[in-house]
Image (cartoon, rainbow, N blue to C red):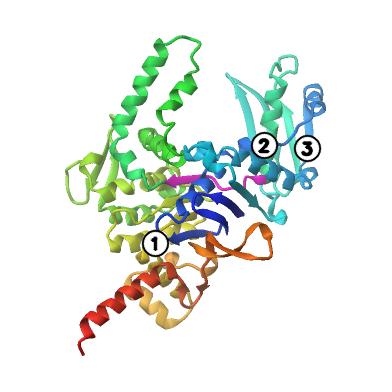
Amino acid sequence: MKVYLKNLGALKQAEFSLGEMTILCGGNNTGKTYATYALFGFLSVWRENFSIYISDQKIDQLLSDGTIHIDITEYRKRIPDIITKGCVSYTKQLPMIFAAPPERFKESLFNVEIDSDDVFSTGKYERRMRAANAELFAINKLEMSNDLVVTLLIDKARAKIPQEVIKQIISDALKDVIFGHLFPNPFIASAERTGAAIFRKELNFARNRLLEEMSQSDKNVNPMELLFKVYQDYALPVKANVDFTRQIETLAKKTSFIAEKHPDILVDFSDIIGGEYTVTRNDELYYIPKGKRVKLTMDESSSAVRSLLDIGFYLKHLAKQGDLLIVDEPELNLHPENQRRVARLFSRLVNLGIKVFMTTHSDYIIKELNTLIMLNHDRQHLKEIAQREGYKAEELINSEKIRVYIAEESQVKLDGGQRKTRCQTLTLASIDPELGIEARSFDATIEAMNRIQEEIVWGER
């Protein structure tokens, strides 16, 4: 999937392709967070913005015959139009995504491009719709089939489902079959996650107070409109973090595939935070330092513990293969050694089928990824180094899985014109399978520091 951006924050015009691991580097206020939030927003709401028309005749046939067959290949020609219109609709939502004035996005554009050869999933699809204790209808697609079958499961005389509802459900199923495998389910840990962890109790209190007021208010008041006023001043990724933090006690009852099949990853994560998170029977969240009996609340815990809270619970309770884990500045509050460990953790997740998207200012993370790339070769001396330094084979990563973009000023052909104009954009960094990532965003600063220090030490000589 390729993403096109125009007039979004500091970015005048930019594009990036989503890899298995995608990294945005660059200075402050160069557009990294804008690109990240726009991507998260799109992946969160694309189903609502994409439109697939279901005819009245199809619904009449379903209610009459009890079954309809939909040839998915009929939608191949419509795909570009569906995507274009969906992106236009999403662009209009950018003020809501960023919780910013509409004037700021008057000339903005967000668009995606996908390879038409990758559109249709060969996998099977199953969905059943229920109401009360009765199953209403089933939607199925067999593996390697292009035939979507919709079957009515109740007597048609009792089928009093509004036709518009049936159309929407079938439309959503088609969206999942056609696009679902291309647009991964996103989970984001924003740069504001530390604050959400500290104030989770206060956020719960504020929300509960609002619910009480709603129950006592006039019946004509729109409860959802009133409810969303709690977070109306926050961008969608921040809202997502707040809501996730509020639901931790409930989420702790679930188990991810990582916890079931790769528990050693959770052990490595526990080493990074120096302990583990726990939820008590009374639904209280604590951090327990390794080797100690004390239980610490989030506001008593270190900033590193708070900054990794969302990621820790995601890994243990929610993670699914095919997800996209988005982390804005994973290095927040972390010692350089733990920044290196996070890089190794992310590499392992990529090798397990979880995509990773991050923005970073950390030279330690980039250099550790370089080490993982450079060690990923079948040479005896590299194997000896990996074993001596404690690197696991499953942490090593192929350079082709990583895409790195530098947020910087560069020459760009605006709107496909012939002349190049210097503006803020995203530049694809080169990655050598032998030497790793060329991260000039950091190199220039490091080289300047080295030059100054060399002159201080050797200048008089």
For mark 2, give the secondary structure: helix
The relative height of residue 87 versus residue 383 in the rendered view (above or below) is above
Residue 284 in the figure: left or right of residue 14: left
The residue segment tinted magenta is 179-189
Vertical placement of residue 5 versus 230, above or below: below
Residue 7: % across, % down: 56, 50
Going from N to C along the chain, the mark reached first, 3 or 1, is: 3
Q: Position of residue 244 (x, y in %)?
A: 40, 37
| Identity, as a three-letter code, of the amino acid under mark 3 | Ile
Q: From the image, state whether disc 3 or disc 1 is nearer to you.
A: 1
Mark 3–mark 1 distance (CA, rounded to whole Å): 45 Å
Answer whether residue 120 is visible to the viewer in this image.
yes
Q: Give the crowd class for mark 2: few <14, some 14-19, many >=20 residues within 10 Å.
A: many
Q: Nearer the viewer, mark 1 or mark 2?
A: 1
- Residue 70's tag is 3
Q: Determine the residue positioned at 60% across, 38% down.
A: 92
In the picture as drawn, the residue positioned furthest to the left comes out as: 293
Q: Where is mark 1, residue-wise?
A: 343
Give the structural element (helix, strand or loop) at label 1. helix
